[in-house]
Image (cartoon, rainbow, N blue to C red):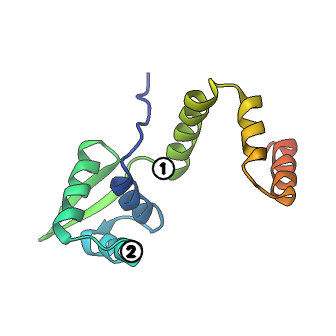
Amino acid sequence: MKNPIRRLPDSELEVMQAVWDCSPPLSRSDIEKIVNKTHPMAVTTILTLLYRLVEREFLTVEKTGNSNFYTPTVQKSDYLAAQSKSLIIKLCGGDMRIFATALCDSGISKEEIEQLRRLLERGEL
């Protein structure tokens, strides 16, 4: 049985977002440039986060010369699906009706609700 995808802490998720938004493999400096646009971090912090992500098996690392290059082992869509399912179970007891009601009550627009309805009807979700 495949291990469930565990939730990442915010700082590690931010690094993974940078990795997912680019074509792998990426160097630490590539990742640093992306992350620093929204949340500046020290080089040592980024290295620590990359090390943790490798340990958690979200990334693989390949050493080429003096540089490490990182490749995701977990796809963004798989992570989002796992975390969405976990959220629905934790907050709504797995009841999609409660989740849908909460989503509609959250302030999303009628256009967004209609877009969601069309996606569901076409089976695109």
**Tag 1 residue:** 75
Q: Residue at x 78, y 45 (%)?
A: 104
Query: Which quadrant does the C terminus fall into?
Result: top right
Please state, as top left, top right, bottom left or bottom right, where the N terminus lies in the image.
top left
Sequence order check: which comes first, mark 2 or mark 1?
A: 2
Name the amino acid, label 1: Gln
Residue 85 visible from this viewpoint = yes
As helix, strand or loop, the secondary structure at mark 1 comes to loop
Query: In the image shown, does 86 or 60 lie closer to the viewer?
Result: 86
* Nearer to us in this view, 35 or 100: 100
**Residue beneath the point at 43% across and 46% down:** 74
Q: Nearer the viewer, mark 2 or mark 1?
A: 2
**Rendered location of residue 44, percent (x, y):** 16, 66
The quadrant where residue 81 appears: top right
Displayed quadrant of residue 84:
top right
Label 2 element class: helix
Q: Position of residue 5 (x, y in %)?
A: 43, 36
Q: Is residue 125 visible?
A: no
- Asked if the residue under mark 1 is in contact with the one under mark 2, i.e. CB atoms within 8 Å, the reply is no
- Circle 2 residue: 34
Residue occupying the point 35% across, 47% down: 58
Q: Does 25 sit above or below residue 97?
A: below
Residue pictured at 40% horizontal, 60% vertical: 14
The amino acid at mark 2 is Ile
Front residue of this view, candidates 48 and 89? 89
